[in-house]
């Protein structure tokens, strides 16, 4: 057991072998970029691959000054650097010092050719896209039965609507034969007559997502009678399935939110509608009641009984008014009569006779109020309160001081 080495010793030994190999210290490697990630530290981590193999690569932030383009998935590049061992993980990788863009990779070229062809056929037109049902009872899912995608979809769907029915078709989502299982899942769920179908998977490289760039998958989505939401990879990943589907979701979680309505929001809206309806009904009932009261009042006013009652009241009021006018008139006339009586009494000869005055007339019945209206020997009638006195004029006596008064009279 004397030849036992630690892991670190083995990794260090292998690293020294790489360092001593001149060819690995300054080597050009050609391949297609995959799994490219720009780290916040400024380093770039990516993979170079060809049809049969792949190698992990890193370009540190200090080497990026010579990089004149942005690394993207599917690019075919030539990287100059050194192959060495990362002792901590025991993995070898290419430490790139320079990257030259050779052109787009074969997969990306194939992607662009198929996209252009299907677009010319009209598979991407909005007029062919079906609306996603706002209140589905069932949702079908075509994805792998394990992984984060299906768990995210189930968790979000159950949280938003625990009553919805979910149907999973466990499809192969990468590798050989994946496209065929995705197509089979779409057709199976279409026969199941679910309301909406979600087709997707989690993130990955362009080759991992390639099944969703296959023509048979695109045509199966286009021909499906049920609305389909594509949810492939992350937000930056775009596949042919995204273009032809009825709605694209940036992630599987977002697809669940788009496919499954939030029951709480629906119940809240229903409560608002209920309250609005109740208020409208209360207002309507109140208006109807007021209208009924108004019509009832009008009917009462127009009814024969009400008219008779009103006429009776009018006659009673008129009678009372007439009586008051008559009584007032009588009182006024009585008062005037009393005034006239009083005035007549003041002018009455009888009253004056009662005071000692007498009415003197000659034999022709003319009033004698002056000695000049009679002569000696005339017969005079002197009327007093209780009778007449017949007298002969035997003497006429002029009284001083009365002449002027008599003339004035």
Image (cartoon, rainbow, N blue to C red):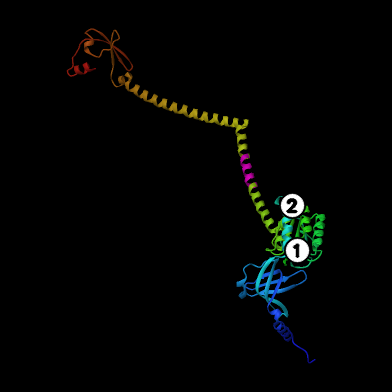
What's the magenta bit mostly, secondary-structure-wise? helix
Residue that mark 1 sits on: 210
Front-most of residues 69 and 166: 69
Is 21 a magenta residue?
no
- Look at discs 2 and 1 and give the one toward the viewer: 2
Quadrant in the rendering for residue 81:
bottom right
Q: Position of residue 117 (x, y in %)?
A: 74, 55
Q: CA distance from mark 2 to mark 1?
A: 21 Å
Dots 2 and 1: beta carbons under 8 Å? no
Quadrant in the rendering for residue 399:
top left
Secondary structure at numbered mark 1: helix
The disc label shown at residue 121, or none: 2
Q: Which residues are magenta?
A: 281-291
What residue appears at the point 60 percent right and 37 percent down from the top-left corner? 297
Is 290 a magenta residue?
yes
Q: Position of residue 258 (x, y in %)?
A: 70, 58
Q: Position of residue 373 (x, y in %)?
A: 23, 10
Front-most of residues 197 and 158: 197
Residue 362 can be seen, yes or no: yes
């Amino acid at each position: 057991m004397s030849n036992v080495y630690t892991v670190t010793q083995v990794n260090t030994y292998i690293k020294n072998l790489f360092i001593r190999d001149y060819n690995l210290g300054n080597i050009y490697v050609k391949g297609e970029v995959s799994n490219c990630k720009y780290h916040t530290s400024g380093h770039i981590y990516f993979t170079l691959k060809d049809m049969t193999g792949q190698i992990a690569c890193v370009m540190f932030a200090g080497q990026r000054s010579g990089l004149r383009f942005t690394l993207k998935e599917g690019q075919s590049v030539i990287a100059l650097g050194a192959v060495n061992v990362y002792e901590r993980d025991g993995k070898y990788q290419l430490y790139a010092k320079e990257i030259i863009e050779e052109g787009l990779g074969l997969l990306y070229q194939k992607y662009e050719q198929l996209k252009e062809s299907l677009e010319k056929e009209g598979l991407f037109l909005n007029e062919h896209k079906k609306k996603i049902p706002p209140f589905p009872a069932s949702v079908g899912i075509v994805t792998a039965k394990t992984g984060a995608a299906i768990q995210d979809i189930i968790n979000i769907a159950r949280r938003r609507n625990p009553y919805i029915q979910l149907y999973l078709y466990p499809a192969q989502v990468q590798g050989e034969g994946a496209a065929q299982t995705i197509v089979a899942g779409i057709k199976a769920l279409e026969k199941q007559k679910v309301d909406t179908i979600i087709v997707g998977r989690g993130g990955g490289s362009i080759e991992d997502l390639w099944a969703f760039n296959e023509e048979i998958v695109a045509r199966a989505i286009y021909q499906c009678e049920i609305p389909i939401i594509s949810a492939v990879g992350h937000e930056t990943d775009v596949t042919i399935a995204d273009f032809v589907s009825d709605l694209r979701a940036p992630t599987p979680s977002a697809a669940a939110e788009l496919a499954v309505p939030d029951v709480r929001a629906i119940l809240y809206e229903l409560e608002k509608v209920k309250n609005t309806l109740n208020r409208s009904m209360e207002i309507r009932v109140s208006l109807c009641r007021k209208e009924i009261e108004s019509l009832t009042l009008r009917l009462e006013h127009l009814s024969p009984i009400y008219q008779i009652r009103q006429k009776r009241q009018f006659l009673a009021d008129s009678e009372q008014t007439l009586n008051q006018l008559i009584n007032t008139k009588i009182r006024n006339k009585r008062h005037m009569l009393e005034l006239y009586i009083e005035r007549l009494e003041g002018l009455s000869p009888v009253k004056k006779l009662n005071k000692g005055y007498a009415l003197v007339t000659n034999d022709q019945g003319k009033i004698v109020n002056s000695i000049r209206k009679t002569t000696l020997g005339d017969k005079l009638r002197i009327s007093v309160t209780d009778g007449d006195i017949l007298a002969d004029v035997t003497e006429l006596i002029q009284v001083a001081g009365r002449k002027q008064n008599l003339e004035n009279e």
